[in-house]
Amino acid sequence: MYLQINRIGFHIIAVCFVLVLISCGNKDSLNEKDKLIHFDVSNWTNNQRIPAKVIKKVKFIPLETNKNCMVGDIKKITMVKDRLYIMDRGINKKIFIFDREGRYLASIGNYGRGPGEFIGLVDFIIDDNKGQLFALDADQRKVLIYNLQDGNFLNDFKINFLSTDFEKLDDNTLSFFSKFPQVNSRKSYSIAIINLKNKSCKWFLEQDVYDTPLSGSYAIFKSNSTYYAPYLKDIVFRLTRGEVEPAITFDFGQKKIPRDKIKGTNRNTRQIIDLLEKGEKDWTYGIENLFETDQFITFNFTLERRHTMVIYSKSSADYYYGNRYEGGLEIFRLIRNIAVNDNQFMGVINAYFFEKAERKILEQGDKELIFEYRQALNTLSNGSNPIIISIEYNIF
């Protein structure tokens, strides 16, 4: 039986900030950017599944595997003009380029300390308007810029703080997340916004000494808008060139970890993690992988010790949530969305587990899914690269 859409406790409220008057003296009006979305998750359970009827189309993209493009730990995918840009932080520590069918095209960057090389590649972004790719080297605290067309190194610039991820706000503005204290500063902040023209930097959101160190490598997520999600907080912020504002809030109810419990760990990160994973109660925390299209917003979080995904419809304000999909994709457990292109959300499946799913997928009798699966399966061999899965959702 399909999971019913949960409407209880969910609503959209207007942001209670002063709206800037638009030129020509028009009356104030609320658009999508000015709405604050609220989720009441206090009564959610961790045994829900996302129904198969939500899925409109599935496509498997097996990445070509050869000695020039061995991909290990995929941390980020970006699709631009039918090209997949994939960052590997595992085997080769570089950015690979594949076409939309998974055929290998080229790579950008190399490990090292010379011009155009990086030691600690942690993130990349693409400026399609300028035809450039920006790579973030955490170890050398600099941003390297490459020509998107041929991959040639152009230049780089230093940043005076340690950052683990960044995103483009507009053609001349970058936002950075830092979970480390800034040097020679009485206060440390989480978000830096840098003007590329003059390299001026503005800081936002003072760091929480308990929350910020727990945030993963990625806390900033870019799609239609740019969002920052603190790890233990019940709020997601929207980043713009000049400000940081609330965008999504949550009511965790009794599942929110009490502040005094966190303080009892004396800022010991290992103790906080043990409290979250092995504590006397099942907490809710860790909003991540937040992506937005014209129709949907999706994100993950930990609900009572199980990873959960939410698919929210912007048009109806309804949503589904669960720890895995029903139907043929159930075998893959929770597939985390790590990229979005138009209305297609993309995740990653390990080739070994992909091959082991054959019997379960055939049992479901979904002809379209079986066709897609067999096409990808026939390309695999021992040691194959991961499979990119692209999912398009039905409007609800």
Image (cartoon, rainbow, N blue to C red):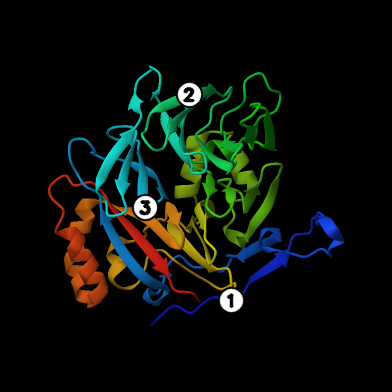
Q: Amino acid at mark 2?
A: Asn
Relative image position of residue 254 (x, y in whole percent) = 60, 60
Name the residue at 46% across, 60% down: 342
Q: Secondary structure at mark 1?
A: loop
Q: Which mark is residue 155?
A: 2
- Toward the bottom, the furthest residue is 1
Name the residue at 26% across, 73% down: 368
Q: Amino acid at mark 3?
A: Asp
Q: Amino acid at mark 1?
A: Arg
Q: Is residue 151 visible?
A: yes
Q: Which mark is residue 82?
A: 3
- Residue 371 as seen in the image, left or right of residue 113: left
Name the residue at 27% across, 55% down: 101
- Residue 357 as seen in the image, left or right of residue 34: left
Nearer to me, 184 or 48: 184
Q: Secondary structure at mark 3?
A: loop
As measured in the structure, the alpha-carbon distance from the residue carrying label 1 to the one carrying label 2 is 51 Å
Q: Which residue is mark 1?
A: 7
As measured in the structure, the alpha-carbon distance from the residue carrying label 3 to the one carrying label 2 is 26 Å
